Image: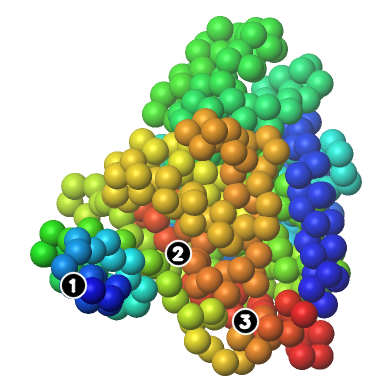
């Protein structure tokens, strides 16, 4: 059995390491997914229904319903959702990923990121920036107006831009950003800056109206350091999905939270979710907030850690420990060193200067997690538990042991052990 | 003096595996000590240990 598992994991990691995520297009969700209608809402994390959703996710559902024009107020949305008229499905089931609440719907424009060395594709919405945003559960008129502006103004420009550029290799940008001190989950200042530099000359070519250009540049450069996150998440989803579906492999290929539960998927265990209660995030709170205001861990952004970035790359981004309340410089190194203990391999693209350019830990192995008891760490924002409050802090969450225990028990049953 | 007796008269360097309280009390006496982050495989869960053993064969 040992050799069979080794061969399977080698195969899974070979596919992950050779994945090449390239941003190729921007398309509306309805153009991509034939089965999607205005009443099918995608969300972050493993499956969840309306009645069990946390405050921020319900708020995001309200925002999306108002944006899609299928309801005119909060009460009407709640009725549609409670009656089952609005149905819900994980983003992951559509090869998509969404940060925080992750609510993705019919009219939303999505990045299309293709694996240039494989056949899989990943999708994500365009980051809304800061303020009263859907991804944190806001549903104000400002929230909906911003979504409309992204749909009608920004997305067509980004589409024109990327088609003119002929694609953008995201792994090159991410590699540079890691060397500049980003871990690509909670620190994207460098990646966003490198991204803007990469697109800027094409942007000014494709937008002739100076007022329109001013508005777009203002949006991309003001209070929007996390703009690249959604593209980074697509890149990680492309990498992780490339390694999925290898029989006997024990490598985790998805890790995602819906604000109530966290779930993982394993390469050799099909599309089954193994779930546990979402963790409390341990971190620093903005002034006026504390842990009693916090929602449990939420978002598909744990795909970053699944693909060897975020908490796994903290040694490359030691400055983040101050933002997350995660200790000292040496703690950043310790987090990454611990993650090597539970990972099967190392990234060939994303290297850590302070560790003599060692690749980041890649390929969480459920056997190693169970054997060592070391849990994957996830860097994350902390959302307020009431809809619309927004981000109230940032910190580190641990993926619960129960996930890996359940996965291993299922794996053993499948092997007849 | 045999080796055991010598230990009582020498400066010690401690590696502690297990309860951290032991290394803490030694450190309080300014004796160098390293705490090893050891835990039983699979948290001591027999079923999980059995599975890991069989999968590693």
**Residue at the image point whose x is 50% and y is 13% from the top:** A214
Q: Position of residue A164 (x, y in %)?
A: 78, 17
Name the residue beneath numbered marker 1.
Answer: B8
Badge 1 density bin: few <14, some 14–19, many ≥20, Cα 10 Å: few
**Residue at the image point whose x is 83% and y is 70% from the top:** A3
| Helix, strand or loop status at disc 1 | loop
Using the rendered view, name the quadrant where residue A233 is placed: top right
Q: Which mark is residue A77?
A: none
Which is more N-terminal, label 3 or label 2? 2
Quadrant location of the C terminus of chain A in the rendered image: bottom right
Name the residue beneath numbered marker 2.
Answer: A398
How are the residues colored? rainbow
**Residue at the image point whose x is 61% and y is 68% from the top:** A368
| Left or right: where A25 falls relative to A407 | right
Residue A301 appears in the picture as rendered: no
| Helix, strand or loop status at disc 2 | strand
Using the rendered view, name the quadrant where residue B13 is placed: bottom left
Q: Position of residue A22 (x, y in %)?
A: 76, 33
| Helix, strand or loop status at disc 3 | helix
Q: Position of residue A176 (x, y in %)?
A: 59, 25
- Front label number (1 vs 3): 1
Q: Chain of mark 1?
A: B
Q: Which mark is residue A406?
A: 3
Nearer the observer, A237 or A210: A237
Q: Chain of mark 3?
A: A
């Amino acid at each position: 059995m040992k050799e069979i598992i080794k061969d399977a994991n080698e195969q899974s990691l070979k596919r992950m390491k050779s994945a090449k995520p390239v941003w190729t297009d921007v398309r509306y969700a309805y153009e991509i997914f034939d089965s999607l209608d205005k009443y099918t809402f995608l969300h972050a994390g493993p499956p969840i229904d309306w009645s069990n959703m946390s405050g921020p996710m319900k708020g995001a559902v309200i925002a999306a319903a108002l944006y899609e024009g299928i309801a005119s107020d909060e009460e009407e949305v709640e009725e549609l959702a409670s009656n089952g008229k609005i149905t819900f499905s994980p983003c992951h089931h559509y090869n998509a990923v969404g940060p925080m609440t992750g609510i993705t719907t019919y009219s939303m424009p999505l990045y299309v990121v293709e694996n240039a060395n494989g056949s899989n594709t990943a999708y994500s919405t365009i980051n809304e920036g800061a303020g009263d945003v859907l991804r944190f559960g806001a549903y104000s008129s400002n929230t909906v107006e911003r979504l409309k502006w992204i749909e009608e103004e920004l997305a067509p420009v980004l589409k024109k831009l990327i088609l003119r550029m002929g694609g953008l290799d995201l792994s090159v940008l991410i590699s540079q950003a890691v060397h500049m001190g980003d871990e690509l989950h909670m620190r994207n200042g460098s990646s966003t800056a490198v991204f803007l530099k990469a697109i800027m000359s094409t942007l000014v070519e494709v937008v002739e109206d100076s007022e329109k250009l001013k508005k777009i540049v203002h949006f991309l450069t003001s209070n929007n350091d996390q703009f690249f996150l959604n593209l980074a998440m697509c890149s990680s989803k492309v990498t992780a999905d490339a390694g999925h579906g290898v029989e006997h492999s024990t490598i985790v290929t998805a890790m995602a939270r819906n604000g109530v539960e966290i779930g993982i998927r394993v390469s050799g265990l099909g599309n089954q979710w193994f779930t546990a209660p979402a963790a409390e995030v341990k971190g620093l709170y903005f002034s006026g907030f504390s842990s009693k205001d916090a929602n449990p861990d939420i978002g598909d952004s744990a795909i970053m850690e699944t693909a060897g970035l975020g908490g796994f790359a903290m040694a490359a981004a030691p400055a983040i420990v101050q933002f997350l309340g995660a200790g000292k410089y040496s703690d950043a190194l310790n987090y990454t060193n611990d993650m090597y203990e539970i990972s099967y391999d190392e990234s060939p693209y994303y290297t850590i200067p302070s560790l003599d350019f060692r690749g980041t830990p890649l390929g969480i192995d459920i056997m190693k997690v169970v054997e060592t008891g070391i849990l994957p760490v996830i860097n994350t924002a902390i959302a307020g538990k009431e809809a619309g409050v927004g981000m109230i802090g940032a910190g580190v969450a641990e993926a619960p042991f129960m996930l890996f225990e359940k996965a291993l028990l299922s794996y053993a049953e499948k092997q007849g052990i | 003096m045999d080796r055991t007796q010598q230990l009582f008269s020498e400066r010690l360097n401690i590696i502690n595996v297990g309860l951290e309280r032991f290394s803490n009390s030694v450190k309080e006496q300014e004796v160098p000590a390293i705490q090893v982050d050891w835990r039983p495989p699979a948290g001591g869960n027999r079923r999980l240990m059995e599975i890991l053993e069989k999968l590693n064969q």
